[in-house]
Amino acid sequence: MNKTALFLVVGATLSAALSACGGKTAANDKNFAVTVTQYFDKKGDLCLDPIKWPVDVYEIDLRQQKLYPDGSAGQMAALEAAGLARSGDVELPGAIVGGKASGVKVKRYTMTDAAQPFLHTKPGRQPRICWGRKSLDKVVRWADPAKVGDHQESSVLYTYKLSNVAPWARKPQVKEAFPELGRNVDGEHTQKEKLYVKLTPQGWEALGLND
């Protein structure tokens, strides 16, 4: 092989290598940032756990509210203080004792109209009250890709930022009643989270993206 041919072969090989390093399938901060962003575009909503309305809170729950602020009594009280729920005293049907009905008194909570703008519904799933969205702040680091079955997998450590946060979600009582919400609100830009990703022919994709 003459020098010109050798130069062309080496040049083509180097060009291919550089292309691979900068392509969508490369493991780098830029590609993983795109992957996390795509994940949040589809699954970035932040919502409370599904609540089956109306919610009946029993006397024993009310007595333990201070001890367990994230119990049903504390959560409903927080939503009522935020204007998303209202309560009323209700007596549930009970046994007949001495010819008289012996019912159980509960505090019944129903959703208010103020909660409707925050209500997100998906086919086949219980409606959820949502309070904000996550988006990528920055990629902190990522693990070296490893072979898993017939594809490569990695994990990406990142921090996040919040958008469209409902004003009531920042209230101390709400954050105490819903600890996961509180951690997300207080952890913006600082709390590190991990996303597991896999390599596809189109590039890196979050595991469970299409679930």
Image: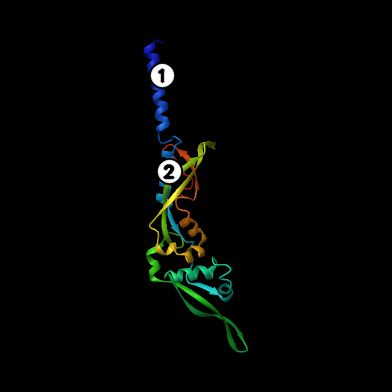
Q: Position of residue 37 (x, y in %)?
A: 41, 46
Residue picked out by circle 2: 35
Q: Position of residue 66 (x, y in %)?
A: 56, 70
Taking the spot 58% from the left edge, 71% from the top edge, the residue there is 64
Q: Nearer the viewer, residue 65 or 201?
A: 65
Q: Nearer the viewer, residue 125 or 47?
A: 47
Q: Amino acid at mark 1?
A: Val
Does residue 128 show up? Answer: no
Q: Nearer the viewer, residue 86 or 205?
A: 86
Residue picked out by circle 1: 10
Q: Residue furthest top?
A: 2
Q: Amino acid at mark 2?
A: Thr
Taking the spot 40% from the left edge, 14% from the top edge, the residue there is 6
Taking the spot 53% from the left edge, 71% from the top edge, the residue there is 73
**Secondary structure state at the residue bearing disc 2:** helix
Quarter of the image that includes the N terminus: top left
Q: Position of residue 59 (x, y in %)?
A: 57, 76
Kindly report the distance in space between the C-alpha atoms of the residues bearing marks 1 and 2: 33 Å
